[in-house]
Amino acid sequence: ISQLRTEFKNRFGDFRAYKEEFRLFVAPFDIDVSEVPTWFQMEAIELQCSEELKAKFSSCSLFNFYKNVIVPSGQFPSLIDNALQVVSMFGSTYRCEQLFSKMKFSKSQLRSQLKDNHLNDILFLSSSVLKPDLDSLCSDRRHIVSNVPIKSKE
């Protein structure tokens, strides 16, 4: 358990440095304006004075509030920048974890002889959204036919 606690502290310790940014993102109407950074104070005052925005904030999800209300208005650029920074942290963390999982799967004990350039190619292909046209790639190749008879399963 102590190893797990240590690992947890190491992995999520960096998030403490972003405590204020998280608070601004999650509860922009509940923050004390005098405690926020100076770059955000005027926007915080304008935001907290708007009853319409308060109503929209309480009636929809956090992501929908930013996506459908704040971002299209363009009225709060510092709040938008903060929201994008916070949201992108988790998206990029997810992609990194996903890539490391693929790497671990690709470089198993069965494939321990993979060189870095081959592993790089495998990771690139496995994380790409492009789908290769295998039929066209194979049509240009000359196939070697084996003379070994195929044993049937009986």
Image (cartoon, rainbow, N blue to C red):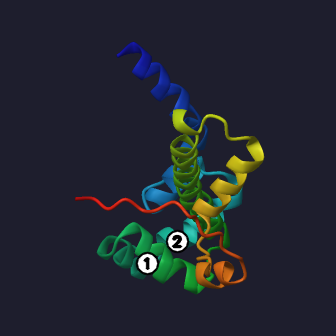
Residue 113 tag number: none
Residue pushed farthest top?
2
- Which quadrant is the N terminus positioned in? top left
Instruction: Measuring from the top left, give residue 77's x and y in whole percent.
Output: 66, 73
Instruction: Measuring from the top left, give residue 142's x and y in whole percent.
Output: 71, 76
Instruction: Measuring from the top left, give residue 146's x and y in whole percent.
Output: 58, 64
As measured in the structure, the alpha-carbon distance from the residue carrying label 2 to the one carrying label 1 is: 7 Å
- When asked about the image quadrant of residue 130, the answer is bottom right
User: Is residue 108 in view?
Assistant: no
Residue pushed farthest left?
154
Residue identified by numbered label 1: 53
- Name which residue type carries label 2: Leu
User: Is residue 22 in view?
Assistant: yes
* In the displayed structure image, the side of residue 145 where residue 58 appears, left or right: left
Which residue does the image show at 65% across and 69% down from the upper left?
144
SS assignment at label 1? helix
- Which quadrant is the C terminus positioned in? bottom left
Q: Is residue 116 above or below residue 1?
A: below
Mark 2 touches mark 1? (CB < 8 Å):
yes
Sequence-wise, the earlier of marks 2 and 1 is 2
* In the displayed structure image, the side of residue 56 where residue 38 appears, left or right: right
Residue identified by numbered label 2: 47
SS assignment at label 2? helix
Which residue does the image show at 51% across and 59% down from the upper left?
25
Q: Using the image as rendered, state which of residue 1 and residue 32 is in the foreground.
A: 1
- Name which residue type carries label 1: Leu
Q: Using the image as rendered, state which of residue 23 and residue 63 is in the foreground.
A: 63
- When asked about the image quadrant of residue 57, the answer is bottom left
Q: Is residue 67 above or below residue 39?
A: below
The crowding category of the residue bearing disc 1, from other C-alpha atoms within 10 Å (few below 14, some 14 to 19, many at least 20), is some
Which residue does the image show at 59% across and 55% down from the upper left?
92
